[in-house]
Each structure stands twice: as C-alpha cells, then as structure tokens.
Image (cartoon, rainbow, N blue to C red):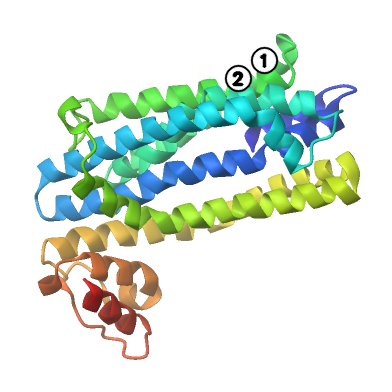
Amino acid sequence: MKSSLAVPCFPGVGASALTGVGLFTPILMLINAFAMLAGAGGAPRVAISIGKKDNRTAEKILGNCFSLLIIMAVILTFIFFIFAPQMLTLFGESGKTLPYAVSYSRIYILGSIFVLIVMGMNPFITTQGFAKISMLTTVIGAVINIILDPIFIFVLDLGVRGAALATVLSQAVGAVWILRFLTGKKTILHLRKENFRLRRDIILPCLALGISTFVMLSTESILSISFTSSLSRYGGDLAVGAMTIITSDTSTSDCLNLSDYFLQSSVQIICIHTLSHADTSRIPNGVWAYYPSETAVCQASAPQRNRRASTYPWSPWPRMVAAQAARM
C-alpha cells in the first residue's frame, strides 16, 4: 500500500500508526475484490461483443457493470464506515493503534467509490485496445499520490488522515480520467444513461466470469485477517507492524510478475476478439502452448464454430475446453 510507506516517518507515533494502517489491508483487499468482480467479469464479455461487431451489446455490458460498481460502492461504504471500529478490533487492533486505524480507514472508505471505478472500469479501456490510456490511469494516480503524501502528512500535519486523503484524491483523479475518456470521442464504447439499468441477461454472465477473481482476492483478505489477528495476539503491535512492512516488500516483489500478467491479459483480449470474429489465423501456435489457461477460457467463451483444435497434443487444455464446451 502506498500510504503505509509514509506512515513510519511520523515522529513518535510511527510504529502505532504503521500497525493501525496495516490492519486496514483486509478491508482494502475486499474492496478490490468487489471491483474486479465487475471488471474481470465484464471486460471479457465486452471483448466477445466487439469481436462480433456488436458494439451495442458491448455498451450495454459496459453500462450495466458501471451501475453495479456504483451500487456496490454505496453498500460497501455504508457497511465499512459504520462497522470499521468493530471490524478493525476483530482483525487485531489494540487500544493504542485503533485511533490511527479508524482515522485512516474511514477517510479511505468514503472514497472507495473512486477505487471501485478505477479498478472496475479500467479493464474496459484495455479491452478496447487503449492500453496507453489504461496505463496512464495508474501512472497519474500514483504520481499524484506521491506528490500529495508529503504535503498532507508533513506540511499540513494531517498524519495518517493525510495519507488516506492523498490516496483518495489520487483515485478520484483517476476516476475522472476514466469517466472522461469513456464519455469522450476517442473511445469505441461509450457510457450511456440508457444502459445503466441492470438487466439480468447481461449482468449475470459477467458475474459468472468475475466470480473466480473475486473469490481469489477475497480469500487473500481472509488470509490477511488470519495473519494479523494471530500476530496481534501472540506478538503484539510490533509484530503486526513488521508484517505490514513485509507485506509492502512482497507487493514490491510482485511487480516482477507484471510483465507476464500484461502478456496474459493481452492474450485473452486478442484470442477473444479473434475467436468471436471467426479469425484464428492471427493467434500464433505458441500462444496456445504457453498460455493454456487463458486460451482455454477464450475457447470456451467463443462460439462453437470458431473453436480450434490444439496443435500441441501434450497440452492439457484441449480436454478442459472440451469439458467446458459440453456444458455450454
């Protein structure tokens, strides 16, 4: 977490503040999980519609997923804001660290709508082929956060609240950037009011695709709760603070996997586009071999007539596709 890196610099309260902010991590992960429920589930459906040259359906999916994100943001803000002290205490907060945790969490939670928009809608920009715009969303937010953190924390002397406020404002700028693009002239698909009404036949397939990502991220949240509560019970605030630092360091090491993540995302988008448009010639054979899970998902999502056989009989994914196709 970007904000947790600034907390230890507080004179006299660094350890307590770091521990307080660190125990907010499970809630942060859960917010991200709900964002990806719509983003990771809706973006492949949009890619399929674009591949079929059906931009009208793609815009309906885009509008429905946006409405779902807003609804989830309102519900999560209400629940987490009211029950933040109880939840943080359950995670292992002590009386010494609880004020810092509540101060940080409630400001962040009030801005969770911006987090959900950024994380949930950015995949729809990437799916349309605007990878540069999608990248700038993250870069702009990160740069603004880096600039605002020292101003709010040290110059304005807002402490932990300043770190949370800097994060919220940076996410707000990212959300405005995304909404301005999706309502502008450069985008292929546009956010339109007439598509905001939720439709069961549109939103349920998106949720079915996004549920795996949601379960993965929410499970990480539960695992984080287990770690922090155990550390708080047996090691105290210092152990939880150390765990927060380790988690931040682990997040840094995770950046090494970003290149492969970007390749996997690109493979999914290209395969879904081409399979939906009955054009498999653009997909190299090596892609089918080295990204079996991604291409298996794309094959299962594509129309029956557009699926192709593997040129690598030793690969396990053709059996996966056949099993999935039999259920469709």
Check whether the beta carbons of the residues at disc 1 and disc 2 lie within 8 A of each other: yes
Q: Is residue 120 visible?
A: yes
Q: Nearer the viewer, residue 194 or 161?
A: 194
**Where is residue 6, by image quadrant?**
top right
The amino acid on which the numbered mark 1 sits, given as a three-letter code, is Phe
Q: Quadrant of the N terminus?
A: top right
Q: Is residue 232 above or below residue 143?
A: below
Q: Nearer the viewer, residue 284 or 65?
A: 65
Name the secondary structure under disc 2. helix
Q: Quadrant of the C terminus?
A: bottom left
| Real-space CA distance between mark 1 and mark 2, rounded to the nearest whole angstrom | 8 Å
* Residue at image point 64% right, 43% down: 26
Mark 1 vs mark 2, foreground winner is 2
Identify the residue under disc 1.
Answer: 152
- Checking the image for residue 165, the label placed there is 2
Q: Earlier in the sequence, mark 1 or mark 2?
A: 1
* Residue at image point 17% right, 38% down: 188
The residue lying furthest to the bottom in this view is 313
Whole-percent x and y of residue 89? 76, 36
The amino acid on which the numbered mark 2 sits, given as a three-letter code, is Leu
Left or right, residue 227 beside residue 311: right
Left or right, residue 61 beside residue 154: left
Whole-percent x and y of residue 233? 87, 48
